[in-house]
Image (tube, rainbow, N blue to C red):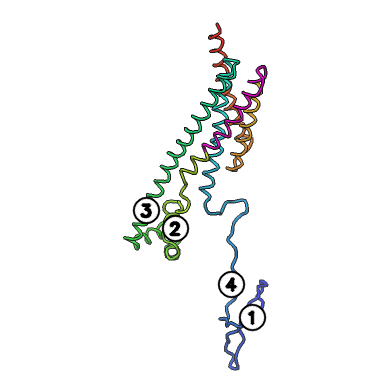
Amino acid sequence: MTTEPSGVELPDTGRDDDGRPTIGQHDDGHPTSGEPKTTEHPAAGHPDEPHTDGLAERLNWLRAGVLGANDGIVSVAAVAVGVAAATSQTGPVLTAGLAALVGGAISMALGEYVSVSSQSDTQKALIAKEKAELATMPQEELAELAQLYEAKGLSPATARQVAVELTEHDALAAHLEAELNIDEDGVVSPWHAALASAVAFTLGAVLPLAAVLLIPEPWRVGVTFVVVLAALAGTGWIAAWIGDAPRVRATARVVVGGALALGATFALGSLLGTTAAG
C-alpha cells in the first residue's frame, strides 16, 4: 500500500520485469484494476429528519387523529356544558352529549373521506397522465426532465446526465418527484383518514361527557371546564410535537379557543335556563 499526503492509503498495483503495472488481487483472490477500492456508505441524513417511505400516509393518520380528538373534546364539551347550565337533570345532558358524539364522529369521518378522496383522485390522475406521456413520448419527457434540473441550477450537460440516469433507474418516480413533487407509493388513503378521525373524535368526546355526567351537580360545570382545558392542552402539545412547532404557542391557541367555546355555550345555556324558569 502507498500513502497519499492526505493519509489515504491506495492499493499497490505492482510492476512486472519491464516496469509495467500489473493487476493485483484482492484478499479473496479476485483481480483488481489497480484503482482504489470504493466503499459503500449509508444514505446520508440527520436522525431527527424524516427520510422514510410512507411519511405522507403516517402524517395524514396523525393529523386526522389529533384534529378529530380536539374536535371531539370541544364539540361535545360545549354541548354538554351548555345543556348542564340550562338544567340540572342528567337525562337531557346525556341525550344531548350522545347526539353530539355520534353526529360529530360521522361528520368528521365524512369530511375527512371527501377531502382526502379529492386529493387522492387528483394524485392518481396525475400519475396516470405521467405514465401515458412516458409511454407515448419518452424523448420529450427526458428533455423535459433535463430542463427541470437545469432550471434548478445544474449545467446542461450535468442536467442531461442526471435525467438519463434517473430515467434508467425509475422514469416514473423521477418525473413524479421533479415535476409534481409526489410519490406513487405516498398516495394517501381516504378510508384511513376517515377511520382515524372518527375514532379520535369519539375518544376525545368520551372525556368531557364522562366528566359532566359523573361529577355531582355543584361542581359539574367547573370540573368539566378544568378537564376539558387540560385535555386540549394535551392535544395541542401533541400536535405541536408532531409538526415540530413551538409547543407553548400552539398549546395556548387550542386552550384559548376551547375556553371561548365553553364560555359561549355556558352563557347561552344559563340564559335559556333562566328564561325557561321565569
Q: Which residue is found at the position 47% from the left and 43% from the top?
A: 191
Highlighted range, magenta = 197-221
Q: Earlier in the sequence, mark 2 or mark 3?
A: 3
Residue named by callout 2? 173
Q: Which mark is residue 39?
A: none
In depth, the one of 29 and 215 nearer the eye is 215
Q: Which residue is found at the position 55% from the left and 16% from the top?
A: 269
The reply to whether the C-beta atoms of the residues labelled 2 and 1 are less than 8 Å apart is: no
The reply to whether the C-beta atoms of the residues labelled 2 and 3 are less than 8 Å apart is: no
Query: Vertically, is 30 above or below 217?
Result: below
Q: Earlier in the sequence, mark 4 or mark 1?
A: 1
Classify the position of the C terminus by image quarter: top right
Q: Earlier in the sequence, mark 4 or mark 2?
A: 4
- Real-space CA distance between mark 4 and mark 1, rounded to the nearest whole angstrom: 15 Å
- Real-space CA distance between mark 4 and mark 3, rounded to the nearest whole angstrom: 39 Å
Residue named by callout 1? 27
